[in-house]
Structures are given as C-alpha cells and as structure tokens.
Image (tube, rainbow, N blue to C red):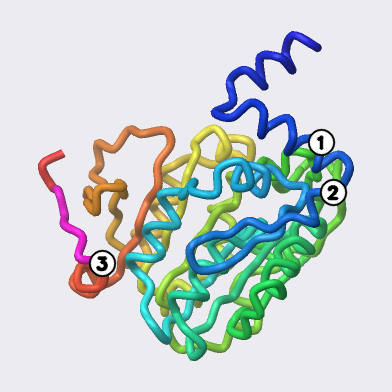
C-alpha cells in the first residue's frame, strides 16, 4: 500500500504540489482556494479535475480548445456530463449573454460543485439539470467513487439513486442546438436514443468514446455510429491540429473523439478547420 502511494506521488509532474493538494482536499481546506482559467474561475473543490487544475492551471483539454474554436455568440450548447463545469463555463463565455448553455450532471455531489462554480462566475446564461440521461424516465443507481471522473451508471443497484430522464423530455425549448457534447462514460448509446428529437435540430455533436466503457452496457462502437448515421450526421475523428478525418467503414480505433456534423460547410466556416481525407 505504502509503495503504491509512493509510486503515485513519484509519477506526478509536480510531486510536492500533489501532496499539498491531497492534504487540502482531505482537510476540506481546498475550498478556500480558487483556480484561474482563461475566461472564468473555479473553486478548488475536492474533486479529481479540480486537483489537476490546481496543480497545473495551464492544463487545457483538447475538447475545451475545440469548443472555443466552434462556438459563436448567441449559440445554444448542451453539456451532457458537465462534471465541475469546465466545459460549461468556457462555453458560456463563448456564446455571450444572449447565448444559452444547458448543463447536465447526474452525481449530486459533483452537481453542487458545478453549481458553485457557476455562481462564482455569476453566469446568467446557464441552466442546470441534476439528472442522468438515458432512453427513458426512471431512477437508476450512480456510482460515487472518490475519483469522481470515473463515476457512471451502475446496473448492479450499487451507489446513489438518481433520476434518469431522456434528453427529449428536458425543458430545452430551442429551435436550434449548435453543439451537443456528450461524456456519458459508456452510456452514450442510450443518451442518443433518448434524444432523437433533439438530434434533428442539432448541428454538431462532440462525443468521446472509449470502447471498454461501452462494453459494460453491452454496446459497441458501431451502435453509436449507426444512430448518428441514421440521423444524417457525417462522422469525423478530431485531432488537436485543427484537422478532421472522415470515419470510414474500415475504422478500427477503440478510443476516439468523434464529431458528428450535419452541415460540413457551416462547420468548416465556423472553425476554419480542414478535412484530411488521406488517412
């Protein structure tokens, strides 16, 4: 046990700051610290992502860069699996006061952190939902592990009981959705099945897929692709080099960030990205 902890600390980019961060989280003193990001602030809540950003405030996920490239003023965006709110807050800054962000986080503990970060920044263009998303309205069990970035729907009736709703049943009264981001830790198929009406008015979907996570719910990568293709989306893999690559029938990746795009010309005009079809 001790050797494993020592190895974990040794492998950190900043071992000393990592030790301090763990102490602050265990004593709950972390809440007195704030983390400055480009367009917003975060409170250092006792969560894995908060800790990572407190240790390295300059860390920027590839996905965050994409949202900043894609979103424009007055856009409407849905953030499924919002966690502590990094995507929600960055997107709220991009769409301005007349834009709208719908932020969805199922874990009640993490939802409180999300809400606290929204209040800290005084954003008025964000609406939040403390529910899980699936293909029906019911209640489910959701894990509440200390490493909150791996929490997901639990089919074994272990964890905390939370409401689950379909995306289409939420009061999102918008004629057009510019961007739908889905991070559902393997439950993406059911989120999509419960959002068929929403998909009809969505321009672009950003979806991170890990095949091992899909398997715990009896799903495959092609299940996701088939739903998106049936809804007239064109599929691309995303890179951090402002390039997108068409997803073909021979696609074999097990983990990928997929962009599902309705209007490719609109997408390229927004982002200034280029298509690399030589893969």
Camera-near label (1 vs 3) is 1
What is the spatial separation of the Cα atoms under label 1 and label 3, in whole angstroms?
Answer: 42 Å
Whether residue 74 sits left or right of residue 190 in the image: it is left
Query: Residue at position x 54%, y 32% from top?
Result: 212
SS at badge 2: helix
Q: Which residue is mark 3?
A: 271
Q: Which mark is residue 29?
A: 2
10 Å neighbourhood of mark 2: few (<14), some, or many (≥20)? some
Q: In the rendered image of this protein, does residue 253 appear above or below residue 132?
A: above
Q: Are the residues at dot 2 and dot 3 in contact (C-beta closer than 8 Å)?
A: no
- Nearer-N-terminus badge (1/3): 1
Whether residue 177 sits left or right of residue 273 in the image: it is right
- Nearer-N-terminus badge (2/3): 2
| Magenta stretch: dominant secondary structure | loop
Q: Which residue is mark 1?
A: 23
Residue 43 vs residue 81, the one in the foreground: 43
Q: Are the residues at dot 2 and dot 1 in contact (C-beta closer than 8 Å)?
A: yes
Measuring from the top left, give residue 278's x and y in whole percent. Answer: 10, 42
Q: Are the residues at dot 1 and dot 3 in contact (C-beta closer than 8 Å)?
A: no
Is residue 132 at least partly visible in the picture? no
Give the magenta range: 272-276
Query: Residue at position x 48%, y 63% from top?
Result: 38
Q: Which mark is residue 7?
A: none
Residue 81 vs residue 230, the one in the foreground: 81
């Amino acid at each position: 046990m001790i050797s494993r902890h020592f190895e974990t600390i040794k492998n950190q980019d900043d071992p000393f700051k990592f030790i301090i961060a763990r102490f602050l989280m265990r004593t709950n003193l972390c809440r007195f610290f704030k983390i400055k990001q480009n367009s917003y602030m975060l409170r250092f809540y006792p969560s894995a992502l908060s800790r990572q950003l407190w240790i390295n405030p300059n860390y920027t996920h590839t996905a965050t860069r994409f949202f900043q490239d894609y979103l424009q003023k007055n856009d409407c965006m849905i953030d499924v699996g919002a966690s502590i709110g990094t995507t929600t807050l960055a997107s709220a800054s991009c769409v301005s006061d007349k834009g709208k962000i719908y932020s969805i986080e199922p874990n009640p503990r993490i939802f409180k952190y999300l809400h606290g970060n929204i209040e800290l920044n005084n954003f008025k263009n964000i609406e939040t939902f403390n529910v899980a998303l699936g293909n029906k309205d019911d209640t489910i069990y959701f894990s509440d592990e200390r490493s909150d970035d791996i929490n997901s729907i639990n089919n074994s009736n272990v964890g905390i009981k939370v409401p689950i709703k379909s995306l289409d049943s939420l009061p999102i009264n918008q004629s057009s959705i510019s961007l739908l981001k889905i991070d559902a830790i393997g439950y993406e198929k059911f989120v999509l099945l419960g959002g068929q009406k929403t998909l009809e008015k969505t321009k672009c979907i950003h979806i991170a897929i890990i095949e091992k996570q899909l398997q715990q719910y009896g799903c495959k990568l092609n299940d996701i692709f088939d739903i998106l293709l049936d809804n007239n989306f064109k599929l691309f893999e995303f890179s951090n080099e402002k390039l997108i690559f068409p997803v073909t029938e021979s696609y074999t990746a097990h983990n990928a960030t997929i962009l599902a795009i309705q209007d490719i010309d609109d997408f390229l005009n927004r982002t200034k990205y280029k298509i690399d079809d030589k893969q």
